[in-house]
Each structure stands twice: as C-alpha cells, then as structure tokens.
Image (tube, helix red, strand yellow):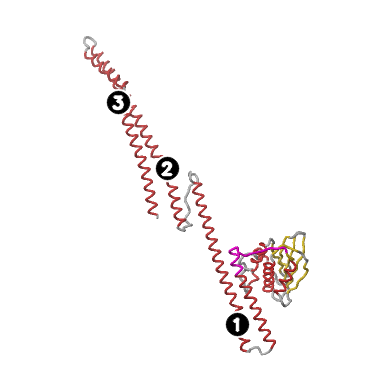
Amino acid sequence: MTAARSSEARRVARRLAGFALAVTVALAALAAAATVALGGDDAAADLRAQVVELNAARSGLSGDGAAQVDAALADAQDALRAAADARGASGVAGVWALFAAGVAAVWAMAGYLYASVVRPFLRLEAFADDVAGGNLDAPLAYERGNPFGKFAWAFDNMRKEIKRARDAEAAAIEQSRTTVAALSHDVKTPIASIRAYSEALELGLARTQAERAGFARTIARKCDEVTRLTDDLFLHALADLDRIVVTCEEAPLHETVRAAVSDFDATGEVAIGRLDHAVVRHDPKRLAQVLENLIANARKYAPGSPVEVSGARVEDGYRIEVRDRGPGMPPEDLPFAFERFYRGGNAAGAPGAGLGLFIVRYLVGQMGGTARLENADPGLRATLEFPCEP
C-alpha cells in the first residue's frame, strides 16, 4: 500500500512538472520570436543607415581641414552604432527578463499546487487506507494555514472519535465477559452447598428432625441465592441490549410493595412500616424486582440487622424507603454505588458482581422515577421516588 501511494505521488509530480516544462518551452519560443523581431527594429535600422551615409560623406572629403572633419564624422558613426546596439540589446534583455520571470512564476505555481493541494490529498488518501485497515493510532498530518487544513482536521477528529468509540466498545465487551465470569463463579458456591446438604440428607447424616429441617432451610436459601444470581445475569444481558420490557400501568403502589415484601420474605424478618395508599403509574413486576434487590443487599451487607420497608405520599409523588440498621456505606462510595460493576469497600468477602443497584436505578428510571442512597446513621437508606397526581 505504501509503494502504491509513493507511485501515485510520483505520477502526480511528473504531471505537474510536465505541465510546467511545456509552459517553459512555450515561453522560450515566444522570447526567441520577440528577439528576432527586435533584430529588425526600424529605429535601429535607421541609425545604421545614417552610419552608411556618413561613410559616403567621409569618402568625399578633401582639402584643408578634411582630417578634422573625418575624425568628427568617425566619432558620430561610433555614437550611432552604439545607440543602435544599445537599443537592440535593451529590448532583447527585457524580453529574456520577462521570460525568466514567467518561468519562475510557472514553476513556483506548480510547487505551490503540489504542496498545498496535491500532497494534502495524497496524505488524506493514505489516512483513509489506514483507517480502513483498522489503524486508528496514526494521526493525519495537517497545517491549519493550508487551504485544506480544516478539512483535514475534521477527518483526523473523526479518527479520534472512531478510536474512542472502539475503545469504549472493547471495554464494554471486556466488562461483560468479566461479569459473566464473576456471576458464573458466584453461582458455583451455592450450588456446591446445595449438593453437599442434599447428599447429607440422602445419606441420613441428619439424626434429628430439627437437623433435617435445618438442612432443608439451607438448601432453600441457597436456591434463592442461585435464583438472584441468574436473575442478575439475565437482566445484565438484557440491559446491555436495551431489551428490558417495562410496562407501566396505573396501579395501587402500596399493594405492589406489600406483595413484593411478602413474596420475598416468608419468614417475616422484613418489617413493613408506614404504607400510604396511592395509585401510581408503575410496572408491578419490575418494581418487585427492584425491592427484592434492595432487601437482598440489606441482608447481605447488614446481616442480622432489621430491615424496614415503608411508603409515603409526598408533595409531588410517592416515596418508598428500604432501610437497614447495619454499618452503612463508606461516604466515598456513595456517588458510585449505582454504577455498573461497582463494589464498595463494604463488599469485601461478600459474593456479587456489582449489578444489583445498577439494575435498581435502571428499572426505576424506566418507570419515570429516581433512586438514591444515603447513610441513615445507623444503617443505609435507599429511597425511590415516583411522580403521581396529588
């Protein structure tokens, strides 16, 4: 490809040089014709004719004083010859001076066209080949003062934007692979526990009814963990494709909250506080997923702490709060808690891929609401707000 570009550059340079050479030859022919024409100039011919007449006058001189007259006539002849030669020489010099100036102008114009027009386009052609070949690191050389400077700058800026987009795409793909790997690894842990407890039950290692019931509860809890992890993986894949379907409808929001807490917490460990009645536009299924994620986070990062869910009418909407009484979240982590894959300092040793709160904000946003986190001293408070009619 480089050899082809060099050949193209040489071909264009030869064309410009050929054009300049043709113009030079034409100017030389014109200068020669002008020189010939100046050789037959009438004024110079009259001066030479006078010299001849003086020759005839000098040959007819005789008598006293002839020598002095002859010398004067000779001086006059010399003056006339010098005048004739000077007139012819000045005209010829002017013609060839114009010729030299014309040739210089032609070659200067050819050089300017190559440097300011042809070479930038050749660079642009090479740049396009590089971009088409996937090389987005090579910048396009350009000069702002060049007539095509802004044009070339726009192309180089396009290269930077394409490179930035490809880098972002590669990072997203890598993050997606990391998430799948992390979730796959996280799924293995509860599955291993389920298998171990199942084998223990099969082998009759549980000696009492209470031990068998404990094994069964552990298996059920681990099954719930697997379900949450697979839901995270599924929702993560759909979020990447913008394919999560959120269907909002006017429905009693307090009933959705109560049903979500009851379905998720069959043991009654999650308390329902104040719960104002209100009909709010939302997707009951997706809001239940949101609340399950928030309650699961509270149990994971504040184990043993009481969790309370409440809902209240506010001036311009409906506010749902999920609060635990645990250690809360480090303040420096709060601004990034809803980012995809982000895990704060309080997540050390806890399973997860940093998707729960990201999914919460995504789904709440699709329903027209907002989500935020804040330390409640003690504990962590997650607040969801949805617009509704007063």
Kindly identify which numbered label has been placed on residue 3.
none
- Left or right: residue 183 versus residue 288 is left
Q: Amino acid at mark 1?
A: Arg
**Residue numbers of the magenta segment:** 234-250
Q: Is residue 316 magenta?
A: no
Q: Amino acid at mark 2?
A: Leu
- Bin the neighbour count of mark 1 within 10 Å (Cα to Cα): few under 14, some 14-19, many 20 and up: few
Vertical side of 115 occupied by 234: above or below: below
Mark 3: which secondary structure? Answer: helix
Give the mark toward the camera: 1 or 3: 1
Q: Percent from the top left, x then y, of residue 92?
A: 33, 28
Q: Percent from the top left, x then y, of residue 315?
A: 77, 59
Q: Pointer 2: what residue?
A: 113
Vertical side of 108 occupied by 312: above or below: below
Quarter of the image containing the C terminus? bottom right
> Residue drawn at (77%, 70%), measured in percent from left and top?
273
Q: Pointer 3: what residue?
A: 39
Mark 1: which secondary structure? Answer: helix
Indicate the quadrant where residue 180 lies: bottom right
Give the mark toward the camera: 2 or 3: 2
CB under 8 Å between discs 2 and 1? no
Earlier residue among tags 2 and 1: 2
Separation of marks 2 and 3 at Cα, in angstroms: 38 Å
> Residue drawn at (69%, 74%), measured in percent from left and top?
299
Separation of marks 2 and 1 at Cα, in angstroms: 80 Å
Earlier residue among tags 1 and 3: 3
Mark 2: which secondary structure? Answer: helix
Kindly identify which numbered label has been placed on residue 195.
1
